[in-house]
Image (cartoon, grey):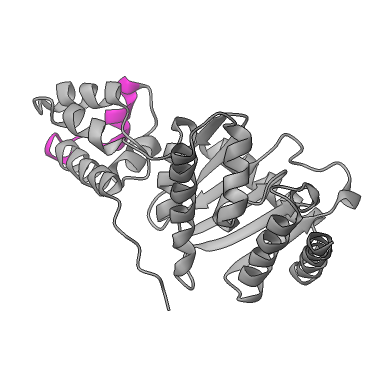
Amino acid sequence: MAVPKDPDPSQSLRVMLGSELRHARLEAGLSQEAVGEPLFVSASYIAKLENGTRRMPHEMACQFDEMFRTNGFFARNCVVANRSKYPDHFAEAADAEAIATKIKQYAPLLIPGLLQTEDYARAVFRAHHPTATDDAINRLVTARMERARILGDPATPLVWMVLDEAALRRQVGGAGVMARSIQHVAKLARANRVIVQVLPFAAGCHAAMEGLLKLMSFEDAPPLSYIEGPGAGHLEDDPATVARHELTYELITASALPPRESLALIESVAEEYGNEAQL
């Protein structure tokens, strides 16, 4: 049975802002391209603002208020709409992830956040923030676990993950934490909730050596891609760049083990960690 998703007030406000932007644009008799041109953004970017897929930057909200004579409406409301419990570099990607119909990701070093257990996430955050208070770490862990609630729906979004073998072999939180974490991934795969492939060390050099890559598709908006480095991330909507990232992902899946063989490897590694934890 699907787990109900609590509404995200900030996301609802972004959808409302987008709807108001569309209304103002149509009232003015302007196309998305005409609105975007003086702001040096594409028509597809305006479309994403209108459907709530992208956040409305405050500077741009002020420009909309001036363009449509809305007396500060967009500027006032975008401040609240842009509040997030996620780090600044990931906040917009998290918003997009929550409404995506398809999520594909290559994870080079860690089990992806959507598939992490609480203990695994806690170990990751503690490594990133060694001097943070327990309360601060708890808030980060809670936010990550809430993200995973999108998997409570039995079918949407479609989630397809390629895990580098390094993500399975690098021990996070100890053998026991790894055993439970990898078993969790296997359980999701066996339940047919996620598609999981493993890119083995034996594959050698591959198309995504530079790091994490996430692709997101939507019901009524163009696709987005997201790349991430240490403490930094970038959400990309340029069609040519997204298409290039799509090709990269296709090349990765071609080099990865098929899902059945990947599951066998995942369960074998989980068993190894389980045996180690009992010593």
The secondary structure that most of the magenta stretch takes on is helix
The residue sitting at 84% across, 61% down in the picture is 279
Which residue ends up furthest to the front in the rendered image? 279
Point out residue 150 in the picture as x, y percentages from the top left corner. 45, 61
**In the image, is residue 32 part of the stretch drawn in magenta?**
yes
Left of 266 or right of it: where is 238?
left
The residue sitting at 32% across, 33% down in the picture is 33
Q: Is residue 220 visible?
A: yes
Left of 87 or right of it: where is 81?
left
In depth, the one of 113 and 157 nearer the eye is: 113
Left of 128 or right of it: where is 88?
left
Q: Which residues are magenta?
A: 26-39
Quarter-of-image position of residue 99 = bottom left
Point out residue 177 in the picture as x, y percentages from the top left corner. 68, 56
In depth, the one of 3 and 24 nearer the eye is: 3
Q: How many marks?
A: 0
Q: Is residue 222 visible?
A: no
The quadrant of the image that shows the N terminus is bottom left
The residue sitting at 73% across, 40% down in the picture is 208
The residue sitting at 64% across, 71% down in the picture is 187
**In the image, is residue 244 part of the stretch drawn in magenta?**
no
Point out residue 3 in the picture as x, y percentages from the top left corner. 40, 70
Quarter-of-image position of residue 190 = bottom right
Point out residue 135 in the picture as x, y percentages from the top left corner. 44, 40
In depth, the one of 180 and 152 nearer the eye is: 180
Is 190 drawn above or below residue 19 in the view shown?
below
Is 199 drawn above or below residue 191 in the view shown?
above
